[in-house]
Image (spheres, rainbow, N blue to C red):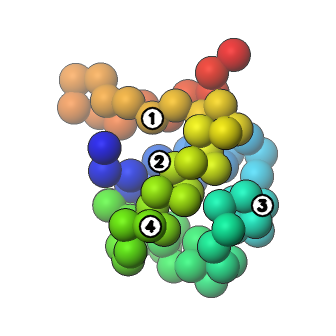
Amino acid sequence: MILTSEMVRAARALLRWEQADLAENAGVSLPTIKRIEKESGPIPGRTATAQAIEAAFAKARIEFSFDRGEAVTKLRP
């Protein structure tokens, strides 16, 4: 799955995380998170960074999927 900046922002909102919270949980720098969220579309940069962000969200019970071509971000119970 290709993670987008919109999905990242939606996931943070569901968790009520600040950008600094995501940076800490994903083990990436705050400037990296800010840069990722600044632009629309697939997150730029290294694949390892996207994987770290996705793993942090998975640990926090965030699930990403697509429904009829639209990205869906939800919090699992």
Q: How far apart are marks 2 and 1 (CA)?
A: 8 Å
Is the residue under label 3 in contact with that under label 1 (CB below 8 Å)?
A: no
* Quarter occupied by the C terminus: top right
Q: Is residue 14 visible?
A: no
Q: Distance between the residues labelled 2 and 4?
A: 17 Å
Pick the residue in front: 7 or 49: 49
Q: Residue at x 68, y 78 (%)?
A: 30
Q: How far apart are marks 4 and 3 (CA)?
A: 18 Å
Q: Nearer the viewer, mark 4 or mark 3?
A: 4
Which residue is the site of mark 3?
Answer: 21
Q: Nearer the viewer, mark 3 or mark 2?
A: 3
Give whichever of discs 1 and 3 has the lower sequence position: 3
Q: Which amino acid does label 4 sit on?
A: Ala
Task: Please tell me in which quadrant of the rendered image residue 1 appears.
Answer: top left
Q: Position of residue 10 (x, y in %)?
A: 56, 45
Query: For the residue carrying disc 4, how many other residues have a C-alpha within 10 Å: few (<14), some (14-19), or many (20+)?
Result: few
Is the residue under label 1 in contact with that under label 2 (CB below 8 Å)?
A: yes
Which residue is the site of mark 1?
Answer: 64
Q: Position of residue 8 (x, y in %)?
A: 53, 53
Q: Which of marks 2 and 4 is in front?
A: 4
Which SS class for mark 1? strand
Q: Is residue 20 above or below residue 72?
A: below
Q: Which residue is drawn at 38% across and 52% down?
A: 3
Pick the residue in front: 29 or 66: 29
Q: What residue type is labelled 2?
A: Met
Which residue is the site of mark 4?
Answer: 48
Which SS class for mark 4? helix
Q: Nearer the viewer, mark 2 or mark 1?
A: 1
Which residue is the site of mark 2?
Answer: 7
Query: For the residue carrying disc 2, how many other residues have a C-alpha within 10 Å: few (<14), some (14-19), or many (20+)?
Result: many
Q: Nearer the viewer, mark 4 or mark 1?
A: 4
Q: Which amino acid does label 3 sit on?
A: Asp
